Image (tube, rainbow, N blue to C red):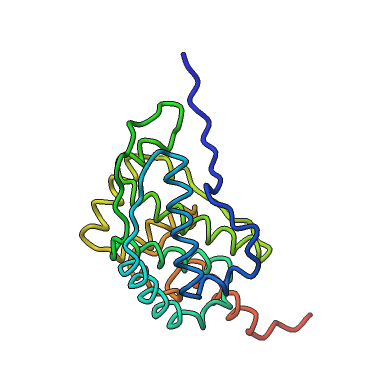
C-alpha cells in the first residue's frame, strides 16, 4: 500500500525582504505591486496565467482598508489573531471583487497535494495563498508562530468554501480562519471583538481587574 503524500503546510510566498509588513500592507501601491508579483510568481510556478484587473484589485483593497480601520482599535487584544483576521478580511474582499481570471490551468499533478485545489478554483487559491502568506509573515515579524491547517489541501473543504462564499462572501473570513488553523467566528466574521481569541483576551482582562481575596 502506497504511503499518503506528505503535505508541507508552508507559505508558497515569502515576504522576508519586506520589513514592517504590518504597515506596508496598508499602502495601496505596495499592495498592488505585491499582489501582481504574487500572481506572476505563482502562475509561472504552476503553469497558470493569472490575469489581474487592477481596477477590481484596488476596489478590493480600499474596501478592505475601510473595514480594517474600523476594527483596528481591537488589535491590542491579540495582535497575532488580528493579523489572521486582517488576512481573512482581505481574502473576503478579493473573493467579492474577483480581480483575477485564470487561464491555461493544467491537469492536477498527483505528486502535488494542492494541485486539485488549484485546478478546482485557481483564483480562490491565489487569493488565499497571498493572504495567508502575508498574514503569516506579519505574525512572525511580531514574534509569534504562524500556523496553517490541512484544509489548505483538502478539496472537499474548498468545495464547501466556494459554494458558501458564492452565496455570502463575508463567510470567507471564517473559512480563512479555518485555513489558518484558528477557531472561526461564523456568526459575525467581520467583527474582531466577536472572535474567540478576542473574547478570551477580554475575559483575561476582566479577571485581572478583579480584587484578589485577602490571604488568610
Image-based side of 5 in relation to 140, left or right: left
Location of residue 214 in the rendering, given as x and y in whole percent from the top left corner: 75, 84
Where on the picture, by quarter, is residue 78? Answer: bottom right
Location of residue 149 in the rendering, given as x and y in whole percent from the top left corner: 49, 47
Point out the residue furthest to the right here. 216
Please tell me whether residue 212 is drawn above or below residue 147 in the rendered image: below
Q: Residue at x 58, y 81 (%)?
A: 206
Q: Residue at x 46, y 13 (%)?
A: 1
Location of residue 170 in the rendering, given as x and y in whole percent from the top left corner: 30, 66
Depth check: give the residue in front, 136 or 12: 12
Please tell me whether residue 72 is drawn above or below residue 54 in the rendered image: below
- Count up the numbered dots: 0
Image-based side of 100 in relation to 200, left or right: left
Quadrant of the image containing the C terminus: bottom right
Location of residue 97 in the rendering, given as x and y in whole percent from the top left corner: 29, 65
Please tell me whether residue 182 is drawn above or below residue 86 in the rendered image: above
Q: Residue at x 33, y 73 (%)?
A: 59
Please tell me whether residue 86 is drawn above or below residue 164 in the rendered image: below
Depth check: give the residue in front, 122 or 48: 48
Point out the residue furthest to the top here. 1
Q: Residue at x 30, y 40 (%)?
A: 104
Amino acid at each position: 500500500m502506497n504511503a499518503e503524500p506528505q503535505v508541507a503546510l508552508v507559505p508558497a510566498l515569502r515576504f522576508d525582504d519586506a520589513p514592517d509588513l504590518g504597515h506596508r500592507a496598508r499602502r495601496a501601491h505596495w499592495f498592488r505591486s505585491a499582489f501582481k508579483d504574487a500572481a506572476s510568481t505563482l502562475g509561472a510556478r504552476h503553469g497558470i496565467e493569472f490575469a489581474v484587473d487592477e481596477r477590481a484589485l484596488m476596489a478590493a483593497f480600499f474596501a478592505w482598508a475601510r473595514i480594517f480601520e474600523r476594527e483596528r482599535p481591537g488589535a491590542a487584544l491579540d495582535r497575532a489573531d488580528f493579523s489572521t483576521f486582517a488576512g481573512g478580511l482581505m481574502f473576503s474582499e478579493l473573493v467579492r471583487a474577483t480581480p483575477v481570471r485564470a487561464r491555461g490551468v493544467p491537469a492536477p499533478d498527483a505528486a502535488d497535494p494542492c494541485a486539485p485545489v488549484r485546478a478546482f478554483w485557481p483564483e480562490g487559491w491565489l487569493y488565499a495563498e497571498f493572504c495567508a502568506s502575508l498574514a503569516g509573515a506579519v505574525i512572525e515579524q511580531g514574534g509569534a508562530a504562524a500556523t496553517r491547517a490541512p484544509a489548505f489541501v483538502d478539496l472537499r473543504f474548498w468545495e464547501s468554501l466556494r459554494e458558501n462564499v458564492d452565496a455570502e462572501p463575508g463567510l470567507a473570513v471564517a473559512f480563512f480562519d479555518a485555513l489558518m488553523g484558528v477557531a472561526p467566528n461564523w456568526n459575525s466574521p467581520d467583527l474582531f471583538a466577536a472572535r474567540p481569541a478576542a473574547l478570551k483576551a477580554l475575559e483575561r482582562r476582566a479577571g485581572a481587574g478583579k480584587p484578589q481575596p485577602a490571604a488568610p
